[in-house]
Amino acid sequence: GQILTLSARGSDLLAKSLEANHRELRRRFESWTDEEIDALATGLERFNEVGDV
């Protein structure tokens, strides 16, 4: 049960961290144009495709 407890706590911390990062990113990206965001999204999609290989 120890490992499960640890991973549950870990995923809870990860979720909190991601939430905080998401807020920070949204604040940072507020000044971005749609074109910049689209370019980033496209770049991330390409990166994911490379990762799948």
Image (cartoon, helix red, strand yellow):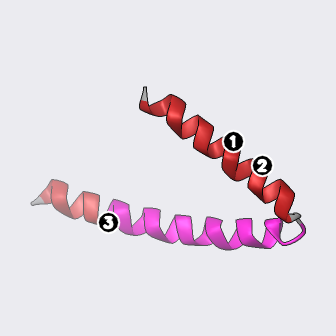
For disc 2, the marked residue is 39
Q: How many other residues sit within 10 Å of disc 2, few (<14), some (14-19) or many (≥20)?
A: few
Report the front residue among 35 and 18: 35
Query: Residue lying farthest top?
Result: 53
**Taking 9 as reference, is 38 above or below it?**
above
Residue at 49%, 71% (x, y): give it. 16
Question: Which one is in front in this view, the residue at disc 3 or the one at disc 2?
Answer: 2
Residue at 63%, 44% (x, y): give it. 44
State the image quarter where residue 22 is shown: bottom right
For disc 1, the marked residue is 43
Look at the image and say whether residue 29 sits in the magenta stretch. Answer: yes
Instruction: Find numbered disc 2 in the image and state the secondary structure of the residue it sits on.
Output: helix
Q: Position of residue 27 (x, y in %)?
A: 79, 73
The residue stretch that appears in magenta: 9-31
Decide whether the magenta segment is chiefly helix, strand or loop: helix
Position of the C terminus, as image quadrant, is top left
The mark nearer the N terminus, 1 or 3, is 3
Return the mark for residue 9: 3
State the image quarter where residue 2 is shown: bottom left
Residue at 35%, 60% (x, y): give it. 10
Report the front residue among 1 and 50: 50
Residue at 73%, 71% (x, y): give it. 26
The answer for how far apart the CA atoms under marks 2 and 1 are is 6 Å
Instruction: Find numbered disc 3 in the image and state the secondary structure of the residue it sits on.
Output: helix
Position of the N terminus, as image quadrant, is bottom left
